[in-house]
Amino acid sequence: AGDPVMEIVALDELEVRVDVPERYYRNLKTTGEVTVTFDSLPGLQVNGRVSAIVPKADPQARTFPVKVRIPNRDGRIGVGMLAQVVLPAGESYRATVVPRDAVVRQGAEQVVFLINGDQKVERATVSTGDGVGSWIVVEGPVKPGTRVVTRGNERLQPGQQVRGEPLEYALP
């Protein structure tokens, strides 16, 4: 007696709750679109909008809840599915990115091995910045379009001959 018998859920628009790390809180905005994807629904990418930024952090995780509204007119998205949300955080800027696998730590330095026209590698010292997925921002002598080594680079020496095979990385 007194307990709910059922719960009615509207499925044409869903709310996704995202826990955002504290360091990004100051950059959050309720304007602009966000992108939502689902591991269980490959190929489905939904544009949504931030409907609320809750200004109370989880004291243990140091994250802030952000609520995102997404359309679900065809009902493909189920309540409780795991979602990945890309939120705009800060101003956009131009940067050179490489796959994270290209960056090798050698002592106190971070280096990337570049493949020149003779199929020999050159060592380039870089500093790293923000990352998205399998990509990371690098600053240094790496130019956009330069081929970099991502496999076996821990054992390379400058000037060593290599045979490069292209690898596909999902874009950020």
Image (cartoon, helix red, strand yellow):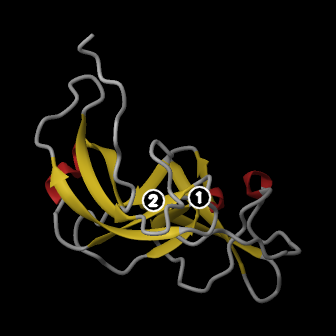
Picture quadrant where residue 124 is located: bottom right
- In the picture provided, is 75 more to the left or to the right than 154? left
Residue pointed to by mark 2: 131
Residue 99 lies, with reference to residue 26, above or below; the image says below
In the rendered image, residue 77, in percent from the top left (x then y), is placed at 50, 57
In the rendered image, residue 109, in percent from the top left (x then y), is placed at 52, 52
The kind of residue tagged 1 is Arg
Pointers 1 and 2 in contact (C-beta within 8 Å): yes
45 vs 74, nearest the viewer = 74
- In the picture provided, is 103 more to the left or to the right than 15? right
SS at badge 2: strand
In the rendered image, residue 167, in percent from the top left (x then y), is placed at 77, 71
Identity of the residue drawn at 19% across and 49% down: 25
Q: What crowding class fits label 1: few (fewer than 14 Cα within 10 Å), some (14-19), or many (20 or more)?
A: some
SS at badge 1: helix
Identity of the residue drawn at 47% across and 51% down: 83
25 vs 119, nearest the viewer = 25
Q: Which mark is residue 92?
A: none
The kind of residue tagged 2 is Gly
Picture quadrant where residue 111 is located: bottom right
**Residue lying farthest left?**
55
Residue pointed to by mark 1: 100
